[in-house]
Image (spheres, rainbow, N blue to C red):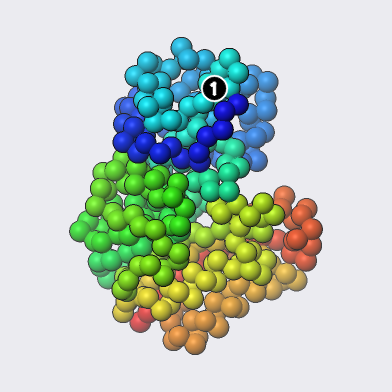
Amino acid sequence: MTQSEPFPQNEEAVLALGRAVRYTGYTFTTVTPATHAHVNARPRNAEAKSLRDVFGWSRPFRADLLPEPILRLMREAGAVVEDGPLLRPTIRFSSLDGELFAHSSYPPSAADAVFFGPDTMRFAGAVIAHLAGRSGPVRRAVDLGCGSGAAGICVAKRAPGAEVVLVDINPAAMRAARVNARLAGTDGVDVRRSDMLRDVEGQFDLIVSNPPFMIDTAARAYRHGGGPLGAGLSLAVAEQAVERLAPGGSLVLFTGAAIVEGEDPFRDAVAALCDRAGLDRSYREFDPDEYGEELANAVYDEVERLALVILTVTRR
């Protein structure tokens, strides 16, 4: 099979493709890679039979399956490769908040893959809930490590007139975020390259982030959190955010926490950070036990569970 990039280079063609796919009424709820592998392994799913099979399940397909205009746009975008006698898509479209989001195809094995999955949907939901309960306006917001840009785009839809910045260090993610912002009609968002917040100036009313939090032996950027039990990037986000929150500003951080002997070292670290900075915080477990399959890895030998957590930090 021909190798491909984690996200196509031709943004205009990808945007046109996304619009054409959306026009068909296509929707798709993206599942975890483990579920995806299980479903695709069923013999009847070896070859695509529908648009959802192609752009959702990333299954190989025959050229005559798709309408000619869509296949032409895939070729123009560089979003399809030869796979023996079949073709294989190199891009996916997932549904969230009434929009379609383009991201890397399955499996997301490249180190710089643009990931979108159930955690993306949980993260966006946490951000939307925060916005619904927020009393102050959002004039300036940043989606830190934006990936597909989903959360930042959800903010931009609900804060018209706000300056919304999407930052990432992954060029493929930046391409995806630019396409997705235009596909959602939020063309005014500003997509920039930045290592954390180092290359973005000023204070923010809202900082949102869903950093990688796993220990990934392949060190894939979308998955590997580094630091103690994968919490390195999450701690770095919290440390930078508390310095950049405007008065009344908030950080919404959706991440994972490795629980050891009933204790949560990440919670303890952010509690100490917020206490030193004099910031209010709330911390809750969104799901007490996710990614149980990871505990089979030796690097998690001392961990009893991996919880999904939402940290909200607010400057009074």
Determine if residue 21 is in view.
no
Q: Which residue lies under the disc numbered 1?
A: 82
Tell whether 189 sits left or right of 92: left
Above or below — where is 56 with respect to 233?
Answer: above
> What x and y, as percent, mark residue 267?
59, 74
Q: Residue furthest left?
A: 161
> Which residue is located at x 59 percent, y 68 percent?
232
> Which residue is located at x 48 percent, y 27 percent?
80
- Name the quarter where the N terminus is drawn: top right
Task: Tell me how many marks there are.
Answer: 1
Tell whether 261 sits left or right of 14: right
Determine if residue 81 is in view.
yes
Amino acid found under the numbered disc labelled 1 = Glu
Tag 1 secondary structure: strand
> Which residue is located at x 31 percent, y 40 percent?
183
> What x and y, as percent, mark residue 63?
48, 15
Rendering quarter of residue 146: bottom left
Label 1 crowd bin: few (<14), some (14–19), many (20+), radius 10 Å:
some
> What x and y, as percent, mark residue 185?
26, 44
- Name the quarter where the C terminus is drawn: bottom left
> What x and y, as percent, mark residue 34?
65, 41
Between residue 165 and residue 27, name the one nearer to us.
165
Q: Residue furthest top?
A: 64
Above or below — where is 64 with respect to 6?
Answer: above
> Which residue is located at x 45 percent, y 66 percent?
196
Rendering quarter of residue 20: top left
